[in-house]
Amino acid sequence: MGTSVDSSVGLLLIISGPSGVGKTTITHRVRVRLGAVFSVSMTTRPITQEDTDGVDYHFVDETTFKLHRDAGKLLEWAKVFGNYYGTPRRPVEENLDNGRLMILEIDVEGAIQIKKNMPDCFSLFIEPPSEEALLQRLRRRQREDEQTIRGRFARAKHEIDRARDCGVYDAFIVNDDLDTAVDQAVQAVADELERRRKS
Ligand code: 5GP
């Protein structure tokens, strides 16, 4: 708590991490602590009971998604678990122009695309304390059957390896204790803003 951030400096913050690592909770808390704006992605995945359309995602059909993508209205896009996800371009550009801190919660492939086009972004990757801990968390969510959990676990391991190899992430944060992980993420952003102000 108490980390002050100068909101007159626009910054694009990417937060990635495998499913089950707690990144949605971390992203939410970091957004509140830093007074940041969350980029609402467009997706073709079916809406669940936990989702609010227009808040968590813009839920669209595949035709609509592809129309936006092909018209250049998405900053990046990726296919994750068989569904399309993408970042609407306009809100990101407008908020950055207004000096806001903009948070994108996207996968590694999306982060690689953003880094290529907007190298000024700052990227955090949330990791589980261990593979075993991640598997346990995926099981504890009781959202999916064992086969789906295994599939998510395999993809998570691949995503962690890819994140380490791709050179896009500025910091890796281990989510062992949630409060500590949030503090570390907030501190990393505050340090980065301070560094940029000085340079
Ligand atoms: P979920 O459906 O569980 O909310 O998200 C599945 C995965 O898609 C997560 O890894 C999430 O970070 C990623 N994701 C969500 N929105 C976007 C987006 O706009 N672009 C990309 N590339 N990935 C996204």
Image: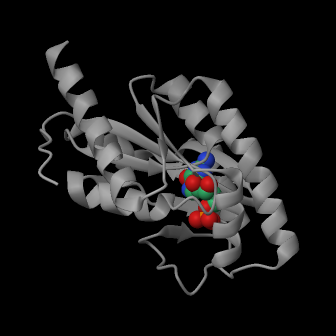
Horizontal relation, residue 129 to residue 6: left or right:
right
Q: As displayed, is residue 6 above or below residue 181?
A: above
Q: Quadrant of the N terminus?
A: bottom left
Horizontal relation, residue 3 to residue 15: left or right:
left
Give me the residue at 57% from left, 58% from top: 21
Q: Nearer the viewer, residue 73 or 58?
A: 58
Can residue 195 be spotted in the picture? yes
Give me the residue at 59% from left, 32% from top: 113
**Farthest bottom residue?**
49
In the rendered image, residue 163, in percent from the top left (x then y), is placed at: 63, 35
- Name the quadrant containing residue 6: top left
Horizontal relation, residue 78 to residue 103: left or right:
right
Can residue 68 be spotted in the picture? no
In the rendered image, residue 181, in percent from the top left (x then y), is placed at: 39, 51
- Ligand 1 is found in the corner quadrant, namely bottom right
Q: Quadrant of the C terminus?
A: top left
